[in-house]
Amino acid sequence: MKELIFEVTEDEAEGGFVARALGQSIITQAENWNELRENVREAVLCHFDEGQAPAVIRLHRVMDEVLALA
């Protein structure tokens, strides 16, 4: 595996961010963006055997915004 993509959303209930890997059972969260980046790296290294982790980790931030037309 060359690349692993995480879908990142904001945790509306408690604040911070939640990152979920696409195609893998990896999920982590953090209070801020820098902490999330470190938590994602740590989670990936824990999930894969030594030498099997992807070379690239992509964080795809998803933002859901509702606009009212009134």
Image (spheres, rainbow, N blue to C red):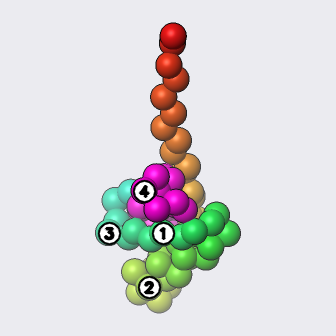
Which residue lies under the disc numbered 1?
29
Separation (CA) of disc 1 from disc 2: 15 Å
Q: Position of residue 5 (x, y in %)?
A: 48, 57
* Label 4: element kind: loop
- Majority SS type along the magenta span: strand
The residue stretch that appears in magenta:
1-21
Tags 2 and 4 in contact by the CB under 8 Å rule? no
- In the picture, the disc for residue 20 is none
The N terminus is located in which quarter? bottom left
What residue sits 44% from the left and 85% below the top?
Answer: 46
What residue sits 54% from the left and 70% below the top?
Answer: 30
Which residue lies under the disc numbered 2?
46
Q: Circle 4: is it few (<14), some (14-19), or many (20+) Cα within 10 Å?
A: few
Q: Position of residue 42 (x, y in %)?
A: 53, 81
Separation (CA) of disc 1 from disc 3: 14 Å
Q: Earlier in the sequence, mark 1 or mark 2?
A: 1
- In the picture, the disc for residue 13 is 4
Q: Earlier in the sequence, mark 2 or mark 4?
A: 4
Tags 1 and 3 in contact by the CB under 8 Å rule? no
Q: Which residue occupies the foreground of this view, 13 or 45?
A: 13
Q: Earlier in the sequence, mark 3 or mark 2?
A: 3
Separation (CA) of disc 3 from disc 2: 12 Å
